[in-house]
Image: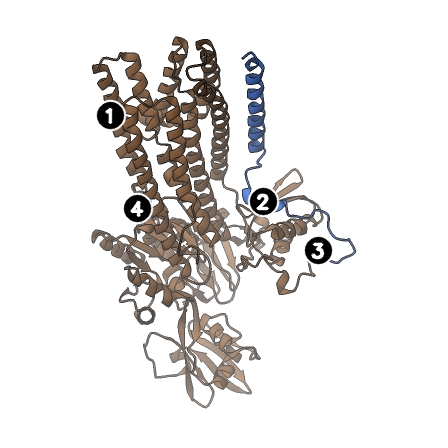
Chain colours: A blue, B brown
């Protein structure tokens, strides 16, 4: 049972970390565009060779 | 982006949303400049996927001086920040060249407050979730160790639970406490009163139990309760903000700029809202008026179909008063802006809008009705439970514990989720179909309508005349089109559309209200009204006519009819098949209305109706006990849209009408009306199912709690199970109709 002395604070700390991350994400506007976020992952940042006239 | 000329490259590559025609207004009046950095918010229509996102952001970001270009796909807003000499219209032009509709967006202050509320609720939800999860961790060990766990350990577990739950509950429950306190001060009760009471009592009793070393503590129940309730609140807030933003965006589509002339005659583009009474305004040919004004210079014709419902243009001369929403069909005109209140038509409409809003606010939602039944019932049950167990002689402490568990278990998690989840899901479905819902309770009102009143011009019809096929020989049409090409009159354009490409006669003179005249091969040719051309076969058969004559004195007639919107016949038949009564209320001429009514098989119609007539008719229907769905687009419909039980407006409607209606549908066809009604009926059914499920849950749970069997474990299971069932019922896809639509 003495393990609880460490385990409970560790569990709480992890939970608090998660909560902190969530609050930070909310405040920095990461939940403002749920629609766009799911598409942004698909955008190719590395464009094709630059001598092409256009991205198509 | 000049390379993007082929049709394939324009708009969304997924082909889901063809961009509607762009506003083409001057957006430079909407640039906010702060210390060299300029920002502009644009409302972009038609962007749907990752391709759109990268195309738009890439193209705008590549412009010189642009530091950020970020498109929010959820609300279609593109924020651009740049410095240097790039013109705002270049940015808007870049987006519209890609094939997307673009218009200036005027950020409103209300949205900032709503955004803060939404974030606060999200954070409160996060805190409650954290607390619920961690307290549950401790509670489960207490429940699992039932009978084996020593009293000291259990007390320690309870103490830690309390240390987490009390601050978390006080923090995340603020919304409920505040609202409950506000209504209690005024001597009423709402849903938040039993919620606050349950949370606070549960915390209080649990603290007492912990100190005493008792077995049952309700810390987990109180934070879990708050978590579920906050989910409902958050969804509700988000829907409200989203519908509000949709309404605002639609208004922004029409955020016209006006060309104002200053004292030196210099023309400058300003926002319509910045125009003061007395300003000199220049209206270009084909431009839609954004302010009311008295004409001081220039003559011609204006298309007032959005203002009065009249499908024929009106001739204007200096001294005439023209209203916002009219389109200038002649040469450019100059006028002096008048204040909106100074005109009786607009003042009437404003009064009707106010009356309609007041009536809307008295509408009681299904959820409100459920709560008004629920609140007294729960409080009485809890009080009776306490008194009953006291009389049974088990002591204050145990009686209180049972009463509190009753309060917790009856607490309306399912009730609070029942309506918002359905509304959010339904609004999302409609949104994808191009229907912008203005409020959640609109769904309930739309679902119960049994009588549909249509406006004609622009709602049932496209508002564009079209030549009746076979009404005149084609070579005559081609001849007359030589004159018609020089005019912006709707009938001229219809004639040109029927004739196809061809030459324009030289020196065509337009005589406002009469017609066109030109000399072709030395002979005078006229195209216009019967009097002007010299015809004597004036007939009133519901169609529009223009006459054409050449020098030989022979007069020919062209017949036009107002083209019905695609799918309107099917829509009318379908609505009637569903037991709805249909009716047309139009400001247009009787013959034109009768024609449309007979084509659609609608028996009841009224023509030449003023806004007051329309409102009176709606009042009469209301007195008969009908629930009227009004569908209209013009300024003259705005009053009746606000007065009706529910209302819809097409995307091309006047901004006043759009803001007065419950939902706005886009697209040329009318299929949207059917799918809105079906979806709304489906949503109402789901809500009623959900409330029934919640009631059923209480019918099982309350006797258990009153009998004293509701331990914290039972409460936790019951609460989460009921919330889950209600949510799942709301999000399950529907079996028929919607899948096809």
Classify residue B502 as left or right of residue B466. right
Mark 4 belongs to chain: B
Q: Position of residue B479 (x, y in %)?
A: 51, 83
Check if mark 4 and mark 1 are on a common chain.
Answer: yes
Name the disc covering residue B355, or none: 4
Circle 3 sits in a helix, a strand or a loop, which is it?
A: loop
Q: Position of residue B91 (x, y in %)?
A: 64, 51
**Relative height, residue B609 to residue B467 (above, below):** above
Quarter in which the N terminus of chain B is drawn: bottom right
Residue beneath disc 2: A38
Of the image marks 4 and 1, the number of the one nearer the N terminus: 4
Marks 4 and 3: CB-CB under 8 Å?
no
Name the disc covering residue B380, or none: 1
Q: Position of residue B57 (x, y in %)?
A: 64, 48
Distance (Cα) linking label 1 and label 3: 69 Å
Distance (Cα) linking label 2 and label 1: 48 Å
Distance (Cα) linking label 3 and label 2: 22 Å
Circle 2 sits in a helix, a strand or a loop, which is it?
A: helix
> Is B100 in front, or is B512?
B100
At horizontal 40% and vertical 70% (from top left) the residue drawn is B562
At horizontal 39% and vertical 58% (from top left) the residue drawn is B673
Q: Position of residue B82 (x, y in %)?
A: 66, 44
At horizontal 27% and vertical 27% (from top left) the residue drawn is B703
Name the disc covering residue B625, or none: none
Q: Residues within 10 Å of mark 3 (few under 14, many from 20)?
A: few
Of the image marks 3 and 2, the number of the one nearer the N terminus: 2
């Amino acid at each position: 049972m003495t393990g609880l002395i460490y385990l409970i604070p560790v569990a709480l700390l992890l939970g608090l970390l998660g909560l902190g991350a969530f609050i930070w994400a909310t405040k920095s506007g990461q939940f403002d565009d749920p629609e766009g976020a799911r598409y942004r992952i698909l955008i190719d940042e590395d464009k094709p060779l630059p001598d092409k006239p256009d991205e198509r | 982006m000049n390379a993007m000329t082929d049709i394939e490259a324009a708009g969304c590559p997924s082909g889901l949303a063809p961009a509607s025609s762009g506003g083409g207004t001057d957006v430079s009046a909407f640039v906010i400049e702060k210390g060299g950095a300029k920002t502009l918010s644009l409302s972009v229509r038609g962007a749907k996927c990752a391709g759109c996102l990268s195309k738009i952001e890439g193209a705008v970001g590549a412009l010189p001086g642009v530091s950020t270009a970020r498109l929010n796909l959820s609300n279609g807003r593109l924020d651009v920040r740049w410095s240097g000499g790039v013109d705002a219209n270049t940015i808007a032009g870049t987006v519209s060249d890609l094939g997307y509709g673009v218009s200036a967006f005027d950020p409103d202050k209300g949205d900032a407050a709503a955004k803060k509320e939404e974030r606060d609720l999200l954070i409160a939800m996060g805190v409650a979730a954290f607390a619920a999860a961690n307290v549950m961790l401790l509670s489960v060990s207490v429940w699992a160790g039932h009978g084996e766990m020593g009293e000291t350990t259990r007390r320690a577990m309870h103490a830690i639970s309390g240390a987490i739950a009390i601050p978390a509950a006080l923090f995340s429950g603020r919304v409920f406490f505040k609202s409950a306190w506000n209504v209690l001060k005024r001597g009423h009760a709402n849903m938040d009163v039993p919620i606050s009471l349950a949370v606070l009592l549960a915390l209080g009793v649990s603290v007492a139990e912990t100190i005493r070393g008792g077995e049952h503590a309700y810390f987990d129940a109180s934070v879990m309760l708050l978590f579920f309730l906050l989910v409902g609140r958050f969804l509700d807030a988000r829907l409200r903000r989203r519908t509000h933003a949709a309404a605002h965006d639609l208004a922004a589509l029409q955020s016209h700029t006006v060309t104002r002339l200053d004292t030196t005659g210099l023309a400058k583009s300003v926002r319509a809202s910045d125009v003061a009474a007395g300003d000199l305004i220049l209206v270009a040919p084909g431009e839609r008026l954004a302010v009311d004004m008295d004409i001081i210079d220039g003559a011609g014709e204006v298309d007032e179909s959005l203002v009065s419902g009249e499908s024929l243009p009106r001739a204007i001369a200096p001294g005439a008063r023209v209203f916002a929403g009219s389109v200038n069909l002649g040469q450019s005109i100059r006028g002096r802006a008048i204040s909106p209140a100074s005109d009786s038509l607009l003042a009437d409409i404003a009064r009707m809008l106010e009356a309609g809003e007041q009536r809307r606010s008295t509408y009681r939602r299904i959820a409100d009705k459920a709560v008004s039944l629920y609140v007294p019932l729960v409080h009485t049950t809890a009080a009776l439970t306490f008194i009953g167990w006291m009389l049974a002689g088990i002591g204050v402490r145990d009686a209180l514990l049972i009463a509190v568990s009753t309060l917790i278990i009856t607490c309306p998690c399912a009730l609070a989720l029942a309506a918002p989840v359905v509304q959010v899901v339904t609004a999302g479905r409609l949104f994808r179909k191009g229907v912008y819902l203005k409020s959640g309770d609109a769904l309930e009102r739309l679902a119960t309508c049994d009588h549909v009143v249509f406006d004609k011009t622009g709602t049932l019809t496209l508002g564009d005349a079209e030549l009746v096929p076979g009404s005149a020989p084609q070579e005559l049409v081609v001849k007359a089109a030589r004159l018609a090409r020089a005019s912006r009159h709707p009938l001229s354009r219809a004639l040109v559309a029927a004739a196809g490409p061809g030459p324009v006669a030289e020196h065509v003179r337009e005589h406002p209200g009469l017609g066109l005249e030109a000399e072709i091969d030395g002979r005078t040719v006229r195209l216009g009204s019967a009097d002007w051309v010299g015809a004597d076969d004036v007939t009133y058969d519901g169609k529009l006519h223009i006459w054409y004559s050449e020098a030989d004195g022979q007069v020919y007639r062209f017949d036009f009819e107002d083209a019905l919107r695609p799918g309107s016949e099917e829509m009318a038949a379908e609505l009637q098949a569903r037991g709805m009564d249909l009716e047309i209320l139009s400001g247009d001429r009787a013959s034109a209305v009768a024609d449309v009514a007979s084509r659609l098989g609608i028996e009841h119609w009224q023509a030449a109706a003023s806004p007051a007539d329309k409102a009176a008719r709606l009042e009469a229907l209301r007195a008969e006990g009908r629930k009227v769905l009004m569908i209209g687009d013009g300024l003259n419909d705005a009053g009746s849209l606000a007065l009706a039980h529910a209302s819809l407006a097409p995307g091309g409607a006047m901004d006043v009408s759009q803001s007065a209606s419950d939902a706005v549908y886009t697209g040329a066809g009318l299929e949207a009306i059917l799918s809105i009604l079906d979806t709304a009926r489906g949503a109402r059914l789901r809500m009623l199912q959900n409330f029934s499920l919640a009631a059923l849950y209480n019918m099982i749970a309350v006797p258990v709690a009153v009998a004293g069997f509701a331990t914290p474990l039972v409460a936790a299971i019951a609460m989460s199970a009921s919330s889950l069932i209600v949510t799942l019922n709301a999000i399950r896809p529907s079996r028929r109709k919607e899948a096809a639509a």
